[in-house]
Amino acid sequence: MAKHSYSFYPGCSSQKAASSSNYQVSVDTMCQELDIELNEIPDWNCCSASIGYAGGGELPRLALSARNIALSEQAHGDQDIVATCAACWLATRETQERLNEDSELMAETNTALAEAGLKLKNDKKIRHMVEVLIEDIGYEELGKHVKKPLEGLKIAGYVGCQTNRPFGIAGESFENPKYLDKMIETVGAEACDNYEKKVSCCGGALAFSEPEKSQALIKDIIESAYDNGADMIVTPCPVCQMNTEVYQDQINATYGTKFKMPVVYYSTLLSVAYGKSAKEAALDGQIIKAKQLEDIAGK
Amino acid sequence: MSNYNQEMIDKYRGNFLKEVQDNVEEGDWVKMCMQCGVCSGSCPLGPHWDHPPQEIFMMIRAGKREEVLESTSMWMCTSCYNCIARCPRGLPITHIMHGLATYSKRLGLAPQQQPTAKFAQLFWDNLTKKGRVNELKLGLSLYFMNGIGEGIKTSLKMKDIGLNMLKTKRMSPMEYFGGHSCKDTKGFQAMLKKAQELEEARIGKSGS
C-alpha cells in the first residue's frame, strides 16, 4: 500500500499520444519515487476547460465536472481528487463551489447525473498535483530523494494563470507565488528570482483562435526568461508548456528572434534530479530538447 | 435575428441590466462594479477589446444592449483570471464574460466570424461527441473552419508544429480513426441532454 493515495483525474491532453502525454510519463515516474499512488477515475470525461461556453450553457458545463466527481466518489470514496492539468483542476473545483453555493443548480445537476446512473455528494477535496507535493509530501521530503542535484542550471519558474488564479496554492500570493522557485531550489538548481512574466498569460486556448495576439504574449514570456539568464523554463500547466514551447519557430519568424528555450514540467525536473533516465523523465517528449537535463540524466 | 432575441427585447423593454441579471451566468454581480478599471488594465488582451470589462459593465447599465451583445469583446477573454484575482469588489469577471458570450450566442447576436466563438463551438462539439477531446480532429477542424482554401494554407503553415508533435509522440494520426473516448458515451450524452433540457426550461421560465 502506497503512502499517499489519490483519486486521479488525468484529463484529455495527458492521454497516450496527446499533447501532454509527456507530462503524464514524468508524473508517473515522480509519483513512483515518492510513493504516491494515483487511482484513475474510471471513465472520466472532459471538463470543457475554459472554452466550452460557446456551445455549452452553465448547467451542461457543470454536469461535465459533476460526473467526474460523482465517479470518483463511487470508486475512491475516501480519496481526494487530484488533477495535473490546471484547467481540469480549476473546472472541477469551480463546479464543486458553484454547486455547493446553489441548491437549485445542485438539484438540477443530480437530475442530469441520474441519466447516467450517478449521484453527487460533492464533499471531496479537489487538488492540484503541486498541492500534493507541497502540502502532503513537503519540500524537505522532496529534497531527500534528490540523487543528482541540478547544479549550475538557472531556471525560470513560469507558474502561468490557472494554477495560480483564482484558487492558487494556499499561502502563496497571486502576484508572486514562490512555490515553483522553491521546487527549483529543492532540486539543486538556481531560480530566476525576478522573472517578471512568472504569472503572465500565454493566451491559453486563444493561442489556437487568435495566434498573432497570443504569440505576442508568449514572446514576452520567453524573452523575459532569456533576460533573466535562464537555461530553461519550468511550468506546472500543459497549456503553458505547449504554448511556450511549440510556437517558438513561428515567433522567431515573426519577430526576428532566435528563441530556442526548452520548456519542461516540474515533474520532469524532479524525475531527472531523482536519478531517473531521460525516457522516464519524458525528455524525449521535448520538441526543443533540454540538452542539459539529458546530459545529467545520461550520467 | 432569433425569436428568442425578440422575446427578450419585448420582455425587458430597455432594462438591459435586469436582462443581464436574470439571464447571464453570474450576471447579478454587474451592478457591483465601481468602475475602477483594474480589470481592464490587468487583461492580457486588454488592447484588443472593443470594450474592456469595465466599459462593458457601464454599457450594460446604460442599456447599450446590441453594442454589448454584438461586440467581439468578451470573446477576447483568455480565462487568465487576473481580473477576478484583482477586482476590489470581488466580481467574478471571467465568468461574467463567459456568461455574456454564451448569452449572445444563444440570442444569435454573437459576431459570425469571430474566431474564438467558432473555435469554442468546435471544442464543445468535439468533446461532447465521445466525452473526451480528440486533439487531432480539433486541430484539423480549427484549420479548416474558414473553408478549404484557407484550411490548406493554415495546414501548411502549421505543418512543422504538427511534425514536431508527431515526432515526440504528442500526436497520433490514429486519432483520426476513432481515438480516445469515454466508455459510457450513452450515459454521458443522456446526462448532457438532460442538463440542456433543464437549462432551457429555466430560460423559458424567466422568459415567460
Image (spheres, helix red, strand yellow):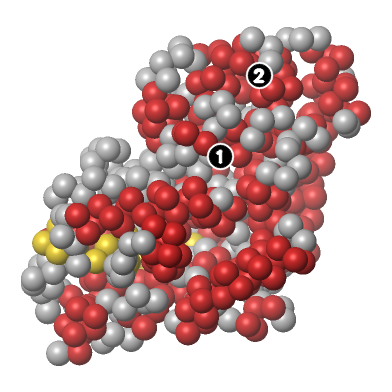
Of residue B99 and residue A31, the one placed in the foreground of this image is B99
User: Is residue B38 in sight in this rendering?
Assistant: yes
Of the numbered discs 2 and 1, the one sitting upstream in the chain is 2
Give the quarter of the image for residue B7: top right
- Residue for point 35% across, 45% down: A200
- Residue for point 79% across, 47% down: B194
Label 1 is found on which chain of the structure? B
User: Is residue B99 in sight in this rendering?
Assistant: no
Q: Is residue B35 left or right of residue A56?
A: left
The x and y percentages for residue B139 are 63, 66
Q: Which quadrant does the N terminus of chain A fall into?
A: bottom left
The x and y percentages for residue A175 are 27, 38
| Number of residues whose C-alpha sits closer than 10 Å to that of mark 1, classed few (under 14), some (14–19) or many (20 or more) | many
Disc marking residue B76: 1
- Residue for point 31% across, 57% down: A222
**Residue type for callout 1:** Met
Which residue of the protein is positioned furthest toward the right in this rendering? Answer: B3
Of residue A287 and residue A121, the one placed in the foreground of this image is A287
Disc marking residue B23: none
> What residue is shown with label 2?
B21
Of residue A135 and residue A73, the one placed in the foreground of this image is A135
The x and y percentages for residue A91 are 52, 48
| Number of residues whose C-alpha sits closer than 10 Å to that of mark 2, classed few (under 14), some (14–19) or many (20 or more) | some
Question: Would you place residue B1 above or below residue B147 in this image?
Answer: above
Q: Could you give the CA–CA distance between mark 2 and mark 1, rounded to whole angstroms?
A: 22 Å
**Residue type for callout 2:** Gln
- Foreground mark, 2 or 1? 1
Numbered disc 2: secondary structure: helix
- Residue for point 69% across, 78% down: B176
